[in-house]
Image (tube, rainbow, N blue to C red):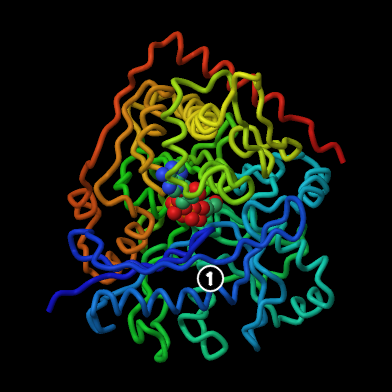
Amino acid sequence: MTSYVAAIDQGTTSTRCMIFDHSGRVVASDQREHEQIFPQAGWVEHDAEEIWENTRAVAGGAIAKADLHPADIVAVGITNQRETALVWDRNTGKPVYHAIVWQDTRTDKIAAELGALGGGQERYRSKTGLPLATYFSGPKVKWILDNVEGVRARAEAGDLLFGNMDTWVLWNMTGGTNGGVHVTDPTNASRTLLMDLDTLQWDAEIAAEMGIPLSMLPEIRSSSEEYGKVRERGALAGVPIAGILGDQQAATFGQACLSPGEAKNTYGTGNFMLLNTGTEKVMSENGLLTTVCYKIGSNDTVYALEGSIAVTGSLVQWLRDNLGMIGTAAEIEEHARKVEDNGGAYFVPAFSGLFAPYWRSDARGAIVGLTRFVNKGHLARAVLEATAFQSREVIDAMNADSGVPLKSLKVDGGMVVNELLMQFQADILGVPVIRPVVNETTALGAAYAAGLAVGFWKSEDDIRTNWAKDKQWDPAMDESRRESEYHNWKKAVTKTFDWVTD
Ligand SMILES: Nc1ncnc2c1ncn2[C@@H]1O[C@H](COP(=O)(O)OP(=O)(O)O)[C@@H](O)[C@H]1O
Ligand SMILES: O=P(O)(O)OC[C@H](O)CO
């Protein structure tokens, strides 16, 4: 009998279930989008119950499309949008508030107040690897406890649970109020500002400073081991859930970046570049994050440096949904191809402030360099180029932190079908850009973590063997143009600073 591994990919815009065979090939997949809720400027929420409903639907959908029985699936892995924070009642299974999404900036004041206790934005960096910014989960949980009526008392009474979306999906898949497992993995926990990067345990002192009861926090287990089995009524009934990786770490694993010095860049809602630094924890001096890359069972923890960019693909969505300038995301390339260059226009999408390498929550988006000459094609180019310029900035930071210049870049994610963007990325970096055959590296990485735990794949060598190149773009821009374009971009970025002054 042929066996398979399934992965649930709970992303920012949609939830997918994918089924993989032993060669890492996609056998079937199903996907559902969920609503993006914007209650006010800077706030972004998700309805966690809708997400759980979608998770059940796509698990059933993928199994049906593949015409398989749960007994054909040897393990399931979970991967997820990271940092997005949810608090729910362990007795009823009901969230006390929507999930607060990673892009949400409402915790700006909380971050500033915590920083004022001493050490400013760097207060928790030595323990957690992270700057004190709106991006991470801890302050989002504090906001819920401080602002939703009656919630703090319920949390202190031990009735409430916190989780990122991995934990919410796992708890529900393993039975919810009927014996649900309340667990996370170190890649997700390393995005909360609450986990000590050395011990891989919650830091009681930081949790106390944020007023978060330890009883709410999930147990931190490895990224690859059996946490429990899918509840009997589920589409994957009885299948062991055996892998959890935050989506960007999952993509790093799925891209076979398994040795120190190997890196990938994922182009989705935002962009996330991760460089495997091995068992060494490198502390950035250039605005990058230090994060857990993966921890496979009882093996040593592998760390990564990460350059997180909040807005890349979501800028294309914004053009489509808010401006109606394009009908589909793919149309942006058609418009961009009608012109030779950006016509002098630069679009800095600081919609959630700026993440790496700036960490400026006071920044807001700007289009600069406009003249009467600029047309729709130039703007389309400026939108795509923004992704490539932002990626160059994090790669420069990575080169500076690691001391080893990147020789080539492995890419994946929804935007890498855009050929113009990929060529411009190679041009502006001056190194080749390489796309793998299986672009669904996020789900694949979670499947690998689960499959390794149950012996479906024997070792990381199987992952290396399965990886194959699909396409490569080589730099074709001359050095002086590359540097002058990049110089203009850097100047454009400075125009977004100091916008939010309250
Ligand atoms: N042809 C394209 N050109 C540019 N951007 C695209 C294209 N197709 C999809 N995208 C963008 O890719 C993103 C979706 O990528 P995906 O990896 O599925 O995202 P996520 O996992 O973050 O939900 C969307 O933001 C969309 O705007
Ligand atoms: O869901 P994605 O692919 O947009 O990824 C979101 C990241 O995990 C946020 O840190």
Q: Residue 356's spot in the image, x, y percent?
A: 59, 36
> Where residue 501 sits in the image (x, y, percent)?
85, 36
Q: Does the rendering let one see residue 59?
A: yes
Say left or right for 380 vs 435: right
| Image point (30%, 29%), residue name | 473
In percent of the image, x 77 and y 80: which residue is there? 154
Mark 1 Cβ inside 8 Å of ligand 2: no
* Above or below 97: residue 494: above
* Residue 280 placement (x, y as % from top left): 44, 41
Q: Give the crowd class for mark 1: few <14, some 14-19, many >=20 residues within 10 Å.
A: many
- Foreground residue, 202 or 263? 263
Side of 320 where 204 appears, left or right: right
- Residue 461 at what x, y percent from top left? 20, 51
Quadrant for the N terminus, please. Answer: bottom left
Q: Which residue is mark 1?
A: 167
Left of 82 or right of it: where is 260? left
Between residue 376 and residue 433, name the one nearer to us.
376
Q: Quadrant of the C terminus?
A: top right
Q: Amino acid at mark 1?
A: Thr
Camera-side residue of 229 and 363: 363
Residue farthest toward the left in the current orientation of the protein:
1
